[in-house]
Amino acid sequence: MAEGETVAKVEPEPVVKAEAKPEAEAVKAEAETAEPEAASASASADADGTKSETKPEAKPEAVDEAKPEAKAEPEPEAKPAPVVEPKPEPVAEAAPEATAAPEPVTATEPEATPEPAPEPVAKTVPKPTVEAEPVTDTEPAPTSLTKVEAQAPALVSLYKAARVSLEKQGLATQRAAVYLVLDRSGSMRNYYKDGTVQHLAEQALGLSANLDDDGTVPVVFFSTDVDGTADLDLTNYAGRIEELHAGLGHMGRTNYHWAINAVIEHYEKSGATDPAFVIFQTDGAPTSKPAAEKALCEAAKLPIFWQFVGFGDPDAKGFDFLRKLDDLAVPERRAVDNAGFFHAGRDPRALADADLYQQLMVEFPAWLQEARTAGILPT
């Protein structure tokens, strides 16, 4: 009995060890399970020996053998070993998760994309400066009434009359350089003497103060050729026309084309961006109609409008050329209709200022529109 007990004690010990070891390593568990099998084999051999000696001893041995078998049942508990095996699998899965962690690091790289944000800031900075430039360049302010009152009080009524006419035509904000072309043919002598030409020059100044920022009027004197040029402004206009005329010498014929070319040359050299409005005064037909017609047709491609004003007998045949200006076909002969004509009568000074300005502005608005459509003026 004592020997059988010792055998029974030896057997359970490896069983306990087998239970603890499978948690760590499945291979060792299998080795240990092999050991109890060998132990059970030796135990059976010993049992055979004892059976030959006494029968009662075999009973406890059988009981002892049954016990280890029952204890051997926990061996399947080693099956949790596969549970241990899947654990490394998630560990392996965690490894790729760790590798996936750098991915957001790469995702942070696009964060550098906000760097283009300062670019629009740089773009918006120059914009206001660019917008401020055209305000001063393309929209110059006309001469103020205050300035006219201070520098040329005698022209205030003309300034106001011209403004009313421009407003009626929708031209209050229109800007233009005003030119004055004066006929110095022999038949014009009396109009210079009695101040009629001087009065027209003052009317031109009143209009220019509304259309131009400096209120200066370039003047071209012509006869057979261009006799002379000068500038009129608010500070130097009184008696100026008679003074200039007296210094120009002989009065000749009436060659329109020389005066037209002189205005074009002056305008192009001035670098002006606004159109030009030319008051072209004469008392008769051009000496050379073909030359005058050619000059006008060629000038049609330029931002210059020619407003002819007749002095003298309204029924004179010499004005037929000017009356037929509208017969110069567009676009066969000229790009746009760039000229108008009206007669101021035998005594132009008797024509009210408001009426004169109204006549001057009859065709100018239509020309502005046609010139923009033709690309002669910016839209």
Image (cartoon, rainbow, N blue to C red):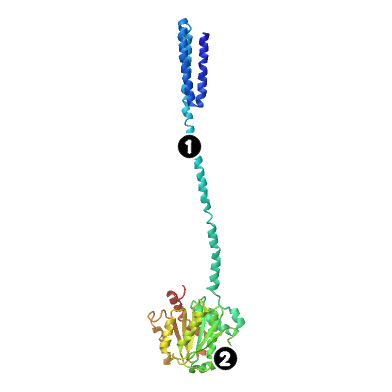
Q: Nearer the viewer, residue 180 or 210?
A: 180
Q: Quadrant of residue 206?
A: bottom right
Q: How far across and how far down the image is residue 122, in percent?
A: 55, 61
Query: Disc 1 to disc 2, how far (Cα)?
Result: 107 Å
N-terminal of the two: label 1 or label 2? 1
The total number of labels drawn is: 2
* Whether residue 256 is situated above or below residue 80 in the rendered picture: below
- The amino acid pointed to by label 1 is Glu
The numbered mark at residue 134 is none
Q: Residue 63: in sight, yes or no?
A: yes
Q: Nearer the viewer, residue 53 or 269?
A: 53
Q: How far across and how far down the image is residue 165, in percent?
A: 51, 80
* Whether residue 308 is situated above or below residue 84 in the rendered picture: below
Q: Residue 54: in sight, yes or no?
A: no
The crowd level at tag 2 (other Cα within 10 Å; few <14, some 14-19, many 20+) is few
Secondary element at tag 2: helix
The crowd level at tag 1 (other Cα within 10 Å; few <14, some 14-19, many 20+) is few
Disc 1: which residue: 93
Task: Please give the name of the residue rendered at 52% of the width and 18% of the height, measured from the top-left corner.
Answer: 13
Residue located farthest toward the right when viewing the structure as drawn: 150
Q: Quadrant of residue 367?
A: bottom left
Task: Please give the name of the residue rendered at 55% of the width and 70% of the height, measured from the top-left corner.
Answer: 133
Secondary element at tag 1: helix
Q: Do the CB atoms of the residues marked 1 and 2 lie less than 8 Å apart? A: no
Q: How far across and how far down the image is residue 142, in percent?
A: 55, 77
* Whether residue 59 is situated above or below residue 244 in the rendered picture: above
> Which of labels 1 and 2 is toward the front?
1
Q: Nearer the viewer, residue 330 or 33?
A: 33
Q: How far across and how far down the image is residue 317, in percent?
A: 41, 92
- The amino acid pointed to by label 2 is Glu
Disc 2: which residue: 243
Q: Is residue 343 left or right of residue 140?
A: left
